[in-house]
Image: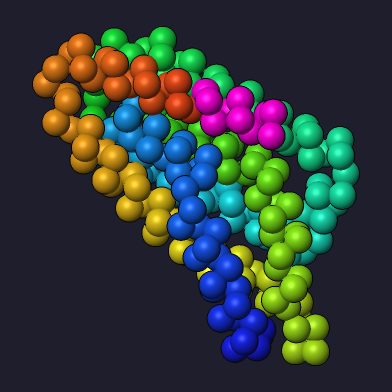
């Protein structure tokens, strides 16, 4: 187990990183604008699943390989960026289609989860962040370094997921009053699509 000092330090670092809205928050809000509150909540959990695999990769050493390889890093970064741009363009194109907020069908639910999972797992910058910061809060003298890193990753994941859920629910609730106006909801969905594509472009060029 990490020391209490390391846990508190990591907790503070995680909170500071998470409370500053970044591309991830923009993505969640934009998804709320394009597919509604429930879709945004599903997006948060799908994204969290992708980040979970990144945490596992970092804890067991695979993340360091990606972070140290320019080719692997850029492949992940551009794949993730391209997928975000695709999601944004798709949202813009389908902005006038009938709105289905029920998500009763498993196909739609699985699609939303799988899309956001891909976004989460292809975020190469998250891996770099974990690789660069996690080891600083691990105490090798306590043994089982992978387990310590998994614990740190879990703390970050829980805080990040709760924060994203707040944004998803708030943005989804703000969107709901628009659903009775076809022109307004179309404009909001288009704006959400532009925001998602913008996140992709920002990811690619930054």
Using residue 190 as the reference point, say whether residue 150 is left or right of it: right
Residue name at image x 73 percent, y 78 percent: 138
Q: Nearer the viewer, residue 36 or 42?
A: 36
Rendered location of residue 158, percent (x, y): 47, 64
Q: Quadrant of residue 206?
A: top right
Q: Residue 123 sits in which quadrant? A: top right
Q: Is residue 132 visible?
A: yes
| Residues rendered magenta in the picture | 197-206
Rendering coords of residue 134 (x, y %): 70, 68
Q: Which of the 4 image quadrants contains residue 57?
A: bottom right
Quarter of the rendering occupied by the N terminus: bottom right
Looking at the image, which is closer to me, 201 or 105? 201
Point out residue 24 in the picture as x, y percentages from the top left corner: 51, 43
Is 85 within the magenta?
A: no
State left or right for residue 10 relative to residue 95: right
Decide if residue 109 is in sight here. Answer: no
Residue 37 in percent (x, y) is at 28, 39
Residue 180 lies left or right of residue 183; in this view the side is left
204 in magenta = yes
Q: Please tell me whether residue 132 is drawn above or below residue 189 in the rendered image.
A: below
- Residue at 86%, 35% (x, y): give it: 71
Secondary structure mostly seen in magenta is helix
Above or below, 26 relative to 164? above
Q: Is residue 108 left or right of residue 51?
A: left
**Residue lying at 27% horizontally and 15% vertically, measured from the top left:** 186
Residue at horizontal 57 percent and vertical 37 percent from the top: 119
Residues 104 and 59: in front is 59
């Amino acid at each position: 187990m990490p020391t209490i000092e390391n846990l508190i330090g990591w907790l503070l670092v995680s909170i500071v990183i998470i409370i500053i809205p970044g591309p991830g928050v923009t993505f969640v809000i934009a998804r709320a604008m394009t597919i509604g509150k429930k879709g945004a909540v599903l997006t948060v959990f799908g994204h969290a699943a992708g980040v979970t695999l990144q945490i596992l990769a970092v804890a067991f050493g695979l993340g360091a390989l990606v972070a140290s390889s320019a080719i692997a890093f850029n492949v992940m970064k551009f794949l993730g960026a391209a997928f975000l741009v695709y999601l944004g363009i798709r949202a813009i194109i389908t902005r006038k289609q009938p709105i289905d907020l029920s998500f009763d069908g498993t196909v739609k639910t699985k699609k939303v989860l799988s899309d956001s999972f891909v976004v989460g797992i292809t975020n190469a910058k998250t891996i770099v962040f974990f690789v660069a910061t996690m080891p600083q809060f691990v105490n090798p003298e306590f043994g089982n370094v992978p387990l310590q890193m998994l614990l740190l990753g879990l703390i970050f994941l829980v805080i990040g997921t709760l924060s994203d859920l707040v944004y998803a629910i708030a943005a989804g609730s703000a969107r709901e009053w628009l659903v009775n106006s076809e022109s307004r909801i179309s404009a909001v969905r288009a704006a959400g699509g532009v925001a998602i594509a913008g996140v992709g472009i920002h990811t690619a060029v930054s």
